[in-house]
Every structure is written in C-alpha cells, then in structure tokens.
Image (tube, rainbow, N blue to C red):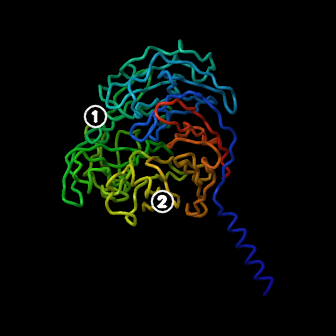
Amino acid sequence: MRLLLFIASFLSILLSFSRAAPTVSLLSNTVLDSNGIFFVSFDGVVNVNSFQLSGVLTFSNWQYAGWYTSSRTAILARRQLPSGSWTTFQLPHQLSTNDSHNVIALGVSPEDGKIHVALDCHSTQVFYTSSEAGLATSGASWVASRFGPITNTIGNLNVGSTVTYPQFVITPDNLLQFVYRSGVSGNGATQLAEYRGGQWFNVGSWASASGTYTSTNGATSNARNLYIHGFTYRNGRTHVTGTWREQNGAVSCSSGGLTNHDTTYFFSDDKGRTWKNSAGSTIGTSGSSPVNVNTGGIIVDSLNADHGLMNQESQAVDSAGQIHAIISYVPGRFTQCVTNYETDRPAFARPFHVFRSSNGTFTKVEIPFALNTVGRSQIAMDAADNIYVVMPFVRIVTASKASGWTDWTMAFDGGANGFKAFGEVTVDRARISSGVLSVLYQVTSSGTTPSAVKLADFRLNG
C-alpha cells in the first residue's frame, strides 16, 4: 500500500512539473537611443504603443526598429541576428506634433526585399517611404540614401488624408499588405491595401462605421469604428479580433468612461477579401459589403460600454489555427460604471485571455495580475502554444498549454529588475518562432525630458 501511495505521489509531482507555466530568461537589455523623444499623450508615448505592431521587426536574419529621437527626427535601425551591433540613420522627417498615436510602422515586401515605412499620422495624411529593392536581404550599407523620398501616399496608392494606425502584414504567399483606419475615432472604416508586382492596390474597407447600436441604457449610436487587436495570418487564414467604439457618448453610463463595447472575431480565407464569422457563415466582402456593428455572429464576448474596455490590445493564433486575444476592462465586482477610465483602469482593470476552442466555443479567463495602469498588454505564443503576455512595465506572465492556459505565473517583473519602463511595450512577432521574444520599451521620464529607448531580448523556456 505504501508503495502504491508513493507511486501515486510521484506521478502527481511529475504531472505538476509537466504542467508548470513556462519561464523566460533575459538575454540582453540594449539601449537603442539614450535620448528618445518623450511626452505623454492619450496615456502613451509615441515610440512604443500597443497598436504599433511592427515598431521592431525581424526579416531574413535581420532585425529592424524605428523611433523618434529627442530632436523629433525619425530613426531607423538595423542589426544582424542573433546579436550583431545596431546601425542607425536618420530619415528626412521630423515628428509633426506631440501625439502618441503618430508611431512608426515597418514592413518588408518579400517579393522584392524592399523595406516599407509608414509614420506620423493620426486622422491626418500619412508619411511613407520605401527602400531600394533587395535591401532587406542583401545586407547592403544601412544609409538613408537607399530610401526614396517621403510621400503622403503609400507608393502609387492614394490612401486619403485621414490615416491612423498603419500596419504592415505579410500574407502566406509572401505578399505585403497595409492595414489602416480611414476617418476618425468613432466614425471610421478599417481599410486594406496590397503590394504585388512593385505596385500597391486597394482592396477596400472591410469594417465600416455603419449600423445602429443600442446600449443597455437605451441610448443609440449611428456611427463608430472597429479597433482591432491584430490582423494575423496562420495556416492560410486571416484572423481578426476587435472592439467597437461608438461615436455617441450617451451609450456609456458616464462621459468619463469609454464607449468601447464587445469583443468580436471573424476571419478570411482569401487574404481579406471575404469574411466569415466563427460559425463559418459569410458575413462581408471588402470594398463592397464590409462588416458592421449589426453583422451577425461576430460577438464572442459581450460587454457593454460601462466597464472601460480597452481597444487595440493584442492577439495570436496557435498551431491549431485557433485565435487567442488579450482584452482588459474593469470587472463588475469593482464597479458597474467606470466614471473616469484614466483613474478607474489603473485602480481596478484586469487583463483577460479570450480564446477559441476547436469546437467553436470561446472561453474567457481572468489573468490574476492587476494592470496598475491605463495601458495594454501584448500576447505571444511559442512553438508549443504556451502563452507569454507582456503586461505594461515589462511584466511577463505566462501560462502553459498543458494546463489549458490556467496556471498564470509572473515569469519576469521589469520593475523588480530595474527596467523602469513607462508602460506599454511592443514586441517583435516575427522573431518569436526562433524562441526569442524581443520587447521594445521606453524608460519612464517626466514632462518632455528625453529618455532611453531600449530593446530587451528574452529566451522563451517553454
């Protein structure tokens, strides 16, 4: 009997080890610029924002980064992986205004090896440039003269004068796409363009401002925009999660809250032309019949506009092709009415992991660590589908697939390790497949005193 009890205990211990949350190991913490521009607007800094997605980017054994230095000049940097020295140059462009939305977004078109840069826009004209062909793969000298002039179009494509949240995405067949919002917050459309054969082509709007939303308090809104958590390809499919922001503030219980509501999910199997909901029903066509707030079957987590639900957090897709998103809001146990999101979110907001199972059901699990800030988190997944969530201040919490993503553990605390990060971070999603998580962040400062822009590399120990 004692032997059986010992064996049972031993097996239990083995099982607990096999289900332990993954860990991370800090490989390096590099200063990219000791004098990055620093100012706070919309609770963020312009060099590091959740919606930036590709402020740091790996392609073909080279890693790229972009930021604004203290003179307001845009800087582009490059190094050869895994640990080459960084080389920088200045683009002939200075940040036009103190707006943290005016981030730098990087992309690479695999078919010709050009590096694309979109920057400095928030419901304004975009600024854009691209490199000579082959620069992303040739390793030629890293100098500004290899890039073309700064334009207010995306190459040959006129994208209008109200562009926000530029993002570059590579498709499974190695085309480059450009995702952005036209219009303004609360009344905008999410747009898609595609680069092929050296030219940009418009695909069109795939999520519009149209439709009517009625809140739980009876107020209605007739315009909005979809804020997306990402535009992610896996196994040939494009996955999108997001949240709606209404134009009419009356849909929220307080003017000091946020009019964001509901978490949505839909996907495309033809590179963003046709869209389907989680059940597989066709719900929209880009350019002619975009998704809107009344589209059926796209809400996967219902939440009214009273809880300070944050827009533009992050998402990832696992090896089985199932979506995982991080959302955050103030749970009802703290209040049923967020009256000031800038104070209530730091005091009460919690992050949640929302994910789809193969049977089509969605699960939401609260991550048991407070945000302690207004800002957002980044989700990453390793090859074994373990999860790493980089919360504000470079706090990395993890959960193992073996546990069903329930064994949340603080794997690294940037505050305790002297990082002094301001808040939100952005990550190099293209490098994660190599088992390294690169985290771009900026050291906190006060007023407009410049501070260091840094890149921390972590080994994922899944």
Disc 2 marks which amino acid? Ser
Q: Position of residue 450 (x, y in %)?
A: 52, 29
Tell me if residue 274 comes above or below residue 149 in the rendering.
below
Rate crowding at label 1 as few (under 14), some (14 to 19) or many (20 or more) other CA atoms within 10 Å. Answer: some
Mark sitting on residue 296 = none
Q: Is residue 355 visible?
A: no
**Along the line of sight, the residue nearer the viewer: 258 or 363:** 258
Q: Position of residue 364 (x, y in %)?
A: 45, 61
Tell me if residue 198 comes above or below residue 3 in the rendering.
above
Q: Is residue 383 left or right of residue 267?
A: right
Q: Position of residue 130 (x, y in %)?
A: 47, 20
Residue furthest out toward the right: 3
**Along the line of sight, the residue nearer the viewer: 90 or 344:** 344
Rate crowding at label 2 as few (under 14), some (14 to 19) or many (20 or more) other CA atoms within 10 Å. Answer: few
Q: Residue at coordinates 40% horizontally, 40% vertically from top-left?
A: 270
The residue identified by callout 1 is 183
The residue identified by callout 2 is 358
